[in-house]
Image (spheres, rainbow, N blue to C red):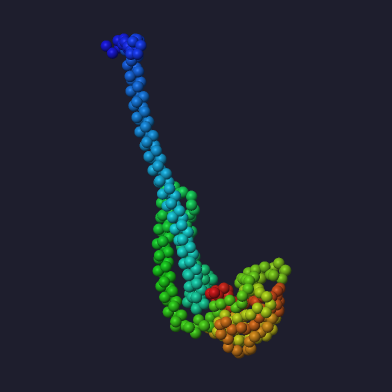
């Protein structure tokens, strides 16, 4: 019955006229179904649009949160790296003191260098994938545990060192521990190319510290002057005996301000920078010797 013909009559009240339309049943049903389909599709698309906007907002919030977390992790990584560097400096300072006081022969053989466990935290402000965030979090956690352990060990070592220092104040006062002169370090201890233009390699027994002629040279520790005078290629030279088989040598001086047998304290003036002897310009050649053997003076400089 639904597929029969339908008559639609349209009346115009003002004119008293009417108009009749004939519509087949199948066309009528098609129009109804089309309208119903359009209505259903509209409702579905509206719901989908609403869900898309909602999820897009959530995604933006999650992205912002992840970026903030990445910034915090990167900042934490940088701070931990700085903390690790500070701890390494404390350990190196500790090792220098031990070398100076002959408390650790193994460190003396290696120059007092400390290789700390762990490494720098890779950071940055760019968003990281979730799996990298997890790896970075594990890395930070591992580094924190390692640094916590290192800190506890270092505290115990510092306590032991302080105890030893209290018992050896005289030894500390007689142990070289400061720069003998201000200036620029132009040559370090060890093998180097000869500065005299020969092109050959030689072993440098100390440190060369350049500064203007006449710059004050000071004793790095308490001691007794054991040599004063000219010493071949060293030029004007002073040697201080600090006891405990430790001595220091100062070469190429322009003037000497101490006498043989004189006692000096840390910071006392002993002379001035010069260019005497076998030298290429005004500087101080500074040596530290233990039992007559030259060692790296940088081990005995704490400031």
24 horizontally vs 123: left or right:
left
Quarter the C terminus occupies: bottom right
| Residue that lies at the very extreme toward the left in this rendered image | 1
Query: Residue shown at 40%/42% (left/top)?
Result: 57
Q: Relative to 164, does residue 10 appear above or below in the rendering?
A: above
Any part of residue 24 in sight:
no
Query: Residue shown at 71%/73% (left/top)?
Result: 280
| Residue that lies at the very extreme toward the right in this rendered image | 197
| Residue that lies at the very extreme toward the bottom in this rendered image | 261
Q: Relative to 288, does residue 68 appear above or below in the rendering?
A: above
Query: Residue shown at 69%/70% (left/top)?
Result: 195
Quarter the N terminus occupies: top left
Query: Residue shown at 40%/46% (left/top)?
Result: 61
181 horizontally vs 165: left or right:
right
Which is more toward the observer, 16 or 46? Answer: 16
Query: In the rendering, at what x and y percent does residue 242 appear?
Result: 56, 84
Q: Quadrant of residue 136?
A: bottom left
Query: In the rendering, at what x and y percent does residue 34 appear?
Result: 35, 20
Query: In the rendering, at what x and y percent does residue 35 appear?
Result: 35, 22
Query: In the rendering, at what x and y percent does residue 181 appear?
Result: 61, 77
186 horizontally vs 48: left or right:
right
Q: Relative to 144, does residue 258 appear above or below in the rendering?
A: below
Any part of residue 263 in sight:
yes
Q: Quadrant of residue 46?
A: top left
């Amino acid at each position: 019955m639904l597929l029969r013909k339908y008559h639609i009559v349209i009346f115009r009240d003002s004119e008293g006229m009417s108009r009749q339309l004939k519509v087949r049943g199948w066309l009528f049903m098609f129009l109804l179904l089309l309208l119903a389909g359009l209505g259903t599709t509209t409702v579905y698309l509206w719901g989908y649009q609403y869900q898309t906007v909602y999820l897009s907002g959530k995604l933006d919030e999650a992205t912002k949160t992840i970026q903030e977390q990445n910034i915090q992790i990167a900042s934490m990584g940088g701070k931990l790296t700085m903390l690790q560097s500070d701890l390494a400096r404390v350990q190196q300072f500790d090792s220098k003191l031990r070398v100076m006081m002959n408390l650790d022969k193994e460190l003396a053989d290696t120059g007092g260098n400390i290789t700390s466990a762990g490494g720098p935290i890779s950071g940055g402000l760019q968003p990281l994938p979730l799996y990298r965030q997890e790896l970075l979090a594990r890395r930070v956690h591992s580094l924190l545990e390692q640094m916590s352990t290192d800190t506890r060990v270092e505290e115990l070592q510092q306590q032991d060192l302080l105890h030893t220092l209290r018992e050896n104040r005289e030894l500390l006062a007689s142990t070289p521990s400061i720069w003998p002169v201000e200036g620029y370090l132009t040559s370090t201890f060890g093998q180097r190319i000869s500065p005299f233009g020969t092109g050959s390699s030689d072993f440098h027994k100390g440190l060369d510290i350049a500064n203007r002629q006449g710059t004050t040279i000071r004793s790095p520790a308490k001691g007794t002057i054991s040599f004063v005078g000219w010493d071949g290629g060293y030029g004007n030279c002073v040697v201080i005996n600090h006891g405990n088989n430790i001595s220091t040598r100062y070469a190429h001086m322009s003037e000497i301000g101490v006498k043989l047998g004189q006692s000096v304290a840390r910071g006392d003036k002993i002379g001035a920078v010069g260019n005497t002897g076998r030298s290429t310009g005004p500087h101080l050649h500074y040596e530290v010797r233990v039992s007559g053997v030259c060692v790296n003076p940088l081990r005995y400089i704490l400031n």
